[in-house]
Amino acid sequence: LAAEQGYAAAQFNLAILFEQGRGVPQDVGEAVRYYRLAGEQGDDYALGNLALLYVQGRGVPQDTVEAIRLYRLAAEKGHVQSQLNLGLLLLRAAAAGRALPAAPGEAA
């Protein structure tokens, strides 16, 4: 498989198939694994999808801080949906009075 040989686009596509159970048994844990592999290679779509799984707590423990970190990485690469999701997540946290970590290079 191209995904096992390190091809990021194949890893991302396989992650989607596992997440949705299309052509393979649904396995969100495997989806997380392949999104992470693709994301480590800079795939902004994979980073955004992985962030959403952290928001939802699907296949990983729910972790807003990790979701924000991943959304930031994808947003910095120009991924528009991650830019939107990051803004909404930060807005909701601020409205709830929750302190969240500052972006790298920002004052806390």
Image (cartoon, grey):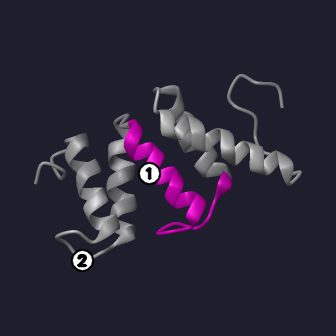
Reply yes or no: does residue 2 show up in magenta: no
Sequence order check, earlier mark of 2 and 1 = 2
Identify the residue position indicated by label 1 in the image. 49
User: Does the residue at mark 2 contact the one at mark 1 (Cβ under 8 Å)?
Assistant: no
**82 over 33 or under it: above or below:** above
At 35% from the left and 62% from the top, the residue drawn is 31
Asked whether, in this view, residue 41 is left or right of residue 23, the answer is right
Identify the residue position indicated by label 2 in the image. 25
- Give residue 42's position: percent from left, percent from top: 38, 34
| Direction top: furthest residue | 105
Residue 86: mark: none
Asked whether, in this view, residue 41 is left or right of residue 94, the answer is left
Which element type, helix, strand or loop, lies under badge 2?
A: loop
Reply yes or no: does residue 52 show up in magenta: yes
At 55% from the left and 59% from the top, the residue drawn is 54
**1 over 83 or under it: above or below:** below
Q: Quadrant of the C terminus?
A: top right
At 24% from the left and 52% from the top, the residue drawn is 13
**15 over 74 or under it: above or below:** below
Which amino acid type corresponds to the residue marked 2 in the rendered image?
A: Pro
| Direction bottom: furthest residue | 25
Which amino acid type corresponds to the residue marked 1 in the rendered image?
A: Asn
At 46% from the left and 69% from the top, the residue drawn is 59
Residue 99 appears anywhere in the view: no
- Give residue 29's position: percent from left, percent from top: 39, 69
Residue 55 appears anywhere in the view: yes
Q: Write the start and end of the magenta stretch as one range.
A: 44-64
